[in-house]
Image: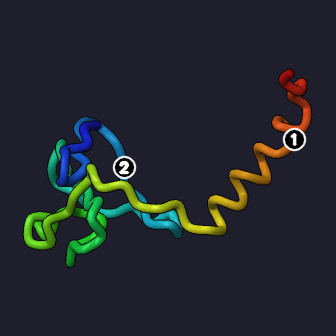
Amino acid sequence: MVAYPNGPLLVRGDFEIVTPDGVPLPRDRKTVALCRCGGSAIKPYCDGTHKLMKFDTTRRRPVPKPARKAAEDAAAPAREAAPAED
């Protein structure tokens, strides 16, 4: 598996791609490119739209508030258990 900068995720070998419902998706190649930009018209496969939309994997996006809150809540017990620093 290779994540190409500003591009798709290339997956090689013997594997199966399934929908969230567990239905296998057809594929006729040993190597497939999976969309990471969200713009492909043939998801989950890449159709090259990342080039048109100038998809940038180096740009950091803020963590959505619900996910950030969950991460902070999960880390809270660890912070409380840590010894105080002098």
- Identify the element where label 2 is drawn: loop
Mark 1: which amino acid? Pro
- Considering every residue shown, the one lying at the far bottom of the view is 41
Separation of disc 1 and disc 2 at Cα?
39 Å
> Residue 50 versus residue 13: which sits nearer the camera?
50
Q: Position of residue 22 (x, y in %)?
A: 50, 63
CA neighbours of label 1 inside 10 A, class few (<14), some (14 to 19), many (20+): few
Which of the two marks, 1 or 2, is nearer to us in this view? Answer: 1
Residue at x-position 20% and y-position 78%: 41
- Identify the element where label 1 is drawn: helix
Q: Is residue 35 left or right of residue 79?
A: left
> Residue 75 versus residue 37: which sits nearer the camera?
75
Q: Is residue 10 visible?
A: yes
Q: Height in image: 53 above or below 71?
A: below
Q: Position of residue 51 (x, y in %)?
A: 9, 64
Residue at x-position 27% and y-position 49%: 58
**Label 1 sits on residue:** 77
Do the residues under discs 1 and 2 have CB atoms within 8 angstroms? no
Residue at x-position 47% and y-position 62%: 62
Q: Height in image: 4 above or below 18?
A: above
Q: Quadrant of the C terminus?
A: top right
* Res 35 quadrant in image: bottom left
> Residue 36 versus residue 85: which sits nearer the camera?
85
Instruction: Say whether disc 1 or disc 2 marks the residue closer to the N-terminus.
Output: 2
